Image (cartoon, rainbow, N blue to C red):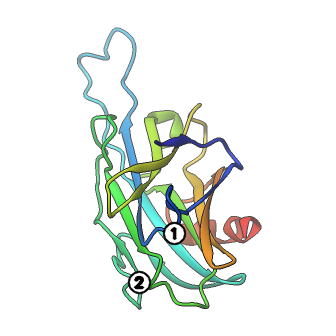
């Protein structure tokens, strides 16, 4: 059963029957907002290139990143599905995803922060049905979903993070608007959420 997360809410990544999850997938979906008005039918919706990234931290130091130009972490524990340049139909499917093998993440990495950037520079006012969701990769079950609501005049979002807690992991919904075309532009904001 999926949990709809609110900003700031946390979710333990334990299996329902006990034990830890092994491999999770953070999926991202979106579509361009539909144009309104008299000329809306004459003008096609503009394509929007949102990019999902995962920044791996050891304490407050970034040690690796996975994004559209570096599709796999140096150790292979985190993998990106590839760059989607247009978004989707706005349904429940992932347009980009990042898979994390929690058992293979190096012991020094204690947090992985997931971001979304509008590479083409459109603001989130031009995006609709944007979401990130956490999926148990073994069963395909959706565990949690964080829906981006309200649009806004910003070009990025610090969506969520997974962090080590004791011997396990938990997910926290961040939902912090930001500005920047790439994860590099967000680094000063990212460290505030560690």
Quarter of the C terminus within the rendering: bottom right
Q: Residue 86 carries which label?
A: none
> Which residue, as the protein is rendered here, is positioned at the far right?
192
Q: Where is residue 33 in the image (x, y as percent from the top left)?
A: 40, 30
Q: Residue under label 1, please give it.
A: 19
Residue 171 left/right relative to 30: right
Q: How crowded is mark 1: few (under 14 residues within 10 Å), some or many (20 or more)?
A: few
Disc 2 marks which residue?
Answer: 73
Task: Check disc 2: other Cα within 10 Å, few if <14, some if 14-19, many if 20+.
Answer: many
User: Along the horizontal axis of the image, is 167 left or right of 83?
Assistant: right
> Which residue appears at 68% of the width and 45% of the height?
7
Circles 2, 1 touching at the beta carbon (< 8 Å): no
Mark yes or no: residue 127 visible: yes
Q: Position of residue 16 (x, y in %)?
A: 51, 55
x then y, percent, for residue 53: 46, 66
| Residue at 39% in and 41% down | 30
> In the rendered image, which quarter is residue 66 located in?
bottom left
115 up-or-down from 89: above or below: below
* Residue 147 visible in the current orientation: no
Q: Which of marks 2 and 1 is in front?
A: 1
For the residues labelled 2 and 1, the Cα–Cα distance comes to 25 Å
Name which residue lies at 32% across and 57% down.
139
Locate residue 153, reporting x and y percent: 61, 39
**Which residue shows up at 55% across the image and 62% down it?**
13
- In terms of depth relative to the viewer, which is nearer, 105 or 153? 105
Element type at mark 1 = loop
Viewer-proximal residue among 48 and 92: 92
Q: Earlier in the sequence, mark 2 or mark 1?
A: 1
Left or right relative to 22: residue 19 = right
């Amino acid at each position: 059963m999926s949990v709809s997360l609110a900003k700031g809410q946390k979710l333990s990544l334990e299996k329902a029957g006990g034990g830890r999850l092994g491999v999770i997938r953070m999926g991202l979906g979106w579509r361009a907002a539909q144009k309104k008005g008299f000329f809306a039918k004459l003008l096609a919706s503009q394509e929007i290139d949102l990019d999902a990234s995962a920044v791996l931290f050891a304490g407050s130091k970034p040690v690796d990143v996975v994004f559209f130009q570096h599709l796999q972490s140096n150790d292979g524990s985190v993998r990106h599905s590839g760059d989607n340049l247009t978004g989707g139909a706005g349904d429940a499917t992932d347009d980009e995803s990042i898979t994390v093998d929690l058992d293979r993440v190096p012991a020094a990495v204690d947090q992985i922060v997931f971001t979304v950037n509008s590479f083409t520079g459109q603001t989130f006012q031009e995006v609709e049905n944007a979401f990130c969701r956490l999926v148990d990769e073994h069963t395909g079950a959706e565990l949690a979903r964080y829906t981006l609501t309200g649009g806004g005049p910003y070009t990025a979002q610090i969506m969520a993070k997974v962090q080590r807690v004791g011997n396990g992991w938990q997910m926290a919904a961040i939902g912090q608007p930001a500005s920047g075309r790439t994860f590099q532009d967000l680094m000063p904001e990212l460290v505030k959420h560690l």
